[in-house]
Image (cartoon, rainbow, N blue to C red):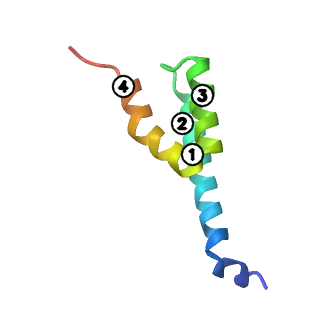
Amino acid sequence: MFGMEWNNGFTFGFLFSLVLGLWAVINILQNDRTGPFGKSVWSVLVLFVPYLGFIAWLLIGPKATKKRIG
């Protein structure tokens, strides 16, 4: 009964994007260097455009908030 739902690739893809999105939003909200506007923009982007938003945040978001030395 429960195992038949996992055969559907849509269900796995949805759960995978949900986990990635929640992980990204938690990291976005815990970031102290980003202001409230930036946090809300990244959160909306990650939640409403799941894969593209997560990849954009992964490539641009954490690197942009690192403190530069020198």
Tell me the distance, in whole angstroms, between the alpha carbons under discs 3 and 1: 16 Å
Q: Is residue 35 left or right of residue 67?
A: right
Q: Which mark is residue 66?
A: 4
- Looking at the rendered structure, the number of numbered marks drawn on it comes to 4
Which one is earlier in the sequence, the residue at label 3 or at label 2?
Answer: 2
Closer to the camera in the image, 39 or 31? 39
Tell me the distance, in whole angstroms, between the alpha carbons under discs 4 and 3: 18 Å
Q: What's under tag 3, amino acid-wise?
A: Val
Residue at horizontal 65%, vertical 43%? 48
Q: Which mark is residue 23?
A: 1
Vertical placement of 11 versus 21: above or below? below
Q: What's under tag 4, amino acid-wise?
A: Lys
Q: Is residue 49 left or right of residue 3?
A: left
Residue at horizontal 58%, vertical 60%? 16
Q: Secondary structure at mark 4?
A: loop
Q: Which mark is residue 41?
A: 3
Which one is earlier in the sequence, the residue at label 1 or at label 4?
Answer: 1
Residue at horizontal 60%, vertical 28%? 41
- Tell me if label 3 and label 2 are in contact, CB under 8 Å: no
Q: Which mark is residue 27?
A: 2
Closer to the camera in the image, 29 or 7? 7
Residue 19: give x, y in percent of width and height: 60, 54
Tell me the distance, in whole angstroms, between the alpha carbons under discs 3 and 2: 14 Å
Q: Secondary structure at mark 1?
A: helix
- Tell me if label 1 and label 2 are in contact, CB under 8 Å: yes
